[in-house]
Image (cartoon, helix red, strand yellow):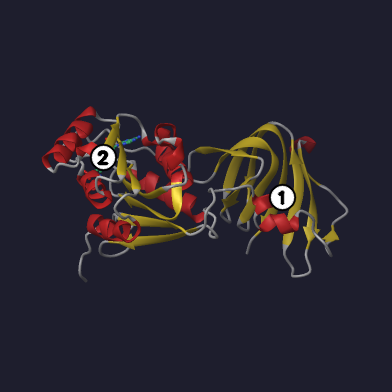
Amino acid sequence: MKRISLPETAHGIVKEYLQSGDAAIDATVGNGHDTAFLAETVGATGHVHGFDVQTQALRATRQRLQQQGLEAWVTLFEVSHAEMARHIPNPLHGGIKAVMFNLGYLPGADKCIITQTQTTLRAIAAACRLLAAPGVITVLAYPGHAGGDEETRCLAAWLERLDAAQFSVETLYSHHHQETAPRLFVLKKIARSAIMRPFFQQQIGAMSEFKNVTIVKQANVYFDGKVNSRTVLFADGSKKTLGFMQPGEYTFNTADPELMEILAGELDVQLPGCDWQTIKGGESFNVPGNAAFTMKVKTASDYCCSFLK
Ligand SMILES: C[S@@+](CC[C@H](N)C(=O)[O-])C[C@H]1O[C@@H](n2cnc3c(N)ncnc32)[C@H](O)[C@@H]1O
């Protein structure tokens, strides 16, 4: 089987979205190959914003840009990409046509300085919000090095929860689907609005109430009544629970996969193999089947849990 170059594939995909005059972000400038590619594509009438946490990466990138005469329309920031939204000018929010991530470590430098799951996820969430529609995010991930395996796994799980009405997600491999093989995640924004927008504005908007359902009389009571819910049965055989959680820490076990919609309140959740994430009223998360997950409920939270089969 022919081996595909994932960096070249990423460039090819970005070129379909990016034109002269556009704005783009390189979230991990490294030695500047992607930055230079983006700068060349948008030209002098466009702009590229680049992020890296290593001085030597920014130095190498600046040098590359100068050699190629591209530096005038590139702004480099020595800050984590998780902070990108604070550094991108407001008029460009929702107008960025392409964001490139190349995870892992800087080739030829300290291999201990690698991208980290938590900041990578925050950065990709920010990129999703900054992105124009249509627009594209490419994320080159390397599960073959220590830390890269967890980062890739959590990222793949996180991408599964992206609103499919707004983003299509594709995973490309260079050769074959080995666990440790590098992979390119391609996120294409297909509708104008933000990630995890309040779900009562999306499909639940039409479902702020459930009609023609059966309610089980007896309450489900957990953790001495600090968490309780009622079961709602639907004509098509599906089931939801509508519940309420008081502040506290709770671990649940699932049999079926679940969609947890937090109607009000705020909590931190730890899903299997992932870091803690904060979920606020109006946001949702998916839990896989046959798993355990823990929630630290910070303020009393109202929820709707849908059992997915
Ligand atoms: C694989 S290299 C990027 C290669 C680069 N795209 C190129 O074309 O040369 C990964 C880069 O991510 C950077 N990095 C690590 N953590 C970061 C963070 N939180 N924010 C921004 N960059 C980060 C590293 O310093 C490293 O330079």
Closer to us: 256 or 86: 86
Q: Is residue 68 visible?
A: yes
**Disc number lying in front (1 or 2):** 2
Are the residues tagged 1 and 2 within 8 Å (C-beta)?
no
The mark found on residue 304 in the picture is 1
Residue 133 x, y percent position in the rendering: 46, 55
Label 1, ligand 1: CB separation under 8 Å = no
Q: Which residue is mark 2?
A: 73
What is the number of the mark on residue 55? none
Taking the image as four quarters, which one is ligand 1 found in?
Answer: top left
For the C terminus, the quadrant is bottom right
In the image, is 294 to the left or to the right of 241?
Answer: left
Amino acid type, label 2? Trp
Number of marks drawn: 2
Secondary structure of residue under mark 1: strand
Figure check: 19 above or below 121: below
Residue beneath the point at 11% across and 40% down? 67
Dot 2 falls on a residue whose secondary structure is helix
x, y (%) of residue 80? 36, 32
Residue that sits furthest to the front in the current view = 45
The residue most toward the left is 67
Taking the spot 18% from the left edge, 31% from the top edge, the residue there is: 59
